[in-house]
Image (spheres, rainbow, N blue to C red):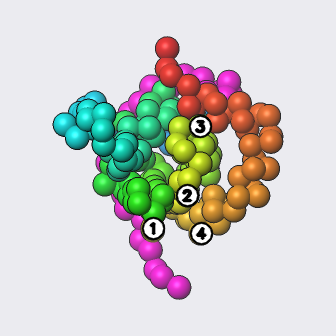
Amino acid sequence: MRHCSFPLRQQCTVIVGPTLSGGSSHVENANLLIYQHSGERSIMVREDEEELPDTIDDREIFSLIRSINDSEHPLTLEELDVVEQVRVKVTDAKSTVAVEFTPTNPHCSMATLIGLSIKVKRIRSLPERFKVDVHITPCTHASEHAANKQLADKERVAAALENTHLLEVVNQCLSARS
């Protein structure tokens, strides 16, 4: 058993309205530190070459998940520093993707929903050959083990996606902000 101490994040005030799921404006973590976008992903010279096979790399996966919306705040996972490019690892040759995400606080009740949203984005965006491991950054959440176990269980993920309300919330997280 490992001992974890939760990192403290600086706080700033965010004015929030209704949640994506249509609920009230009450949020669990109303004081957040907002991070700047890292900018658009630039295209490398080798990516423009038609003769070379397309490979998927860390930057491409980060570009897919960075704009996922938080279900409680009018911000993206990148703006909340929940996802970072350095926490995305891709091995194209082995068809594996590993994504670590860091909830905004150690007791974030939306941690599993965030992970589910990342998994659904993968299902909808990447070839089936990719096996994706989505998990919480070690020692950043009180229920890290339980949430990671749920996210790793294909049957639990499939059952979650059969829940129409939950799927609606995930779809809202994945939709573009207006």
Residue bearing mark 2: 131
Lower position in the chain sequence, tag 1 or tag 3? 3
Between residues 113 and 25, which one lies in front from this camera angle? 113
What residue sits right under mark 3 in the picture? 124
Q: Quadrant of residue 80?
A: top left
SS majority, magenta = loop
Outermost residue to the left: 45
Residue 30: image tag: none
Alpha carbon separation for disc pair 4 and 2? 20 Å
Circle 1 sits in a helix, a strand or a loop, which is it? loop
Residue on which the image places disc 1:
138
CA neighbours of label 1 inside 10 A, class few (<14), some (14 to 19), many (20+): some
User: Which three-letter amino acid code belongs to the residue tagged 4?
Assistant: His
Q: Amino acid at mark 1?
A: Pro
Residue 33 x, y percent position in the rendering: 34, 41
* Residues tagged 4 and 2 counted as in contact (Cβ below 8 A): no
Which percent across, then down, holds residue 158? 75, 50
Q: Is residue 72 visible?
A: no
Going 30% across and 38% down the picture, which residue do you hit? 51
Gap in angstroms between the C-alphas marked 3 and 4: 26 Å
Q: Label 2 neighbourhood size at 10 Å, few (<14), some (14-19), many (20+)?
A: some
> Where are the magenta residues, as a range?
1-24
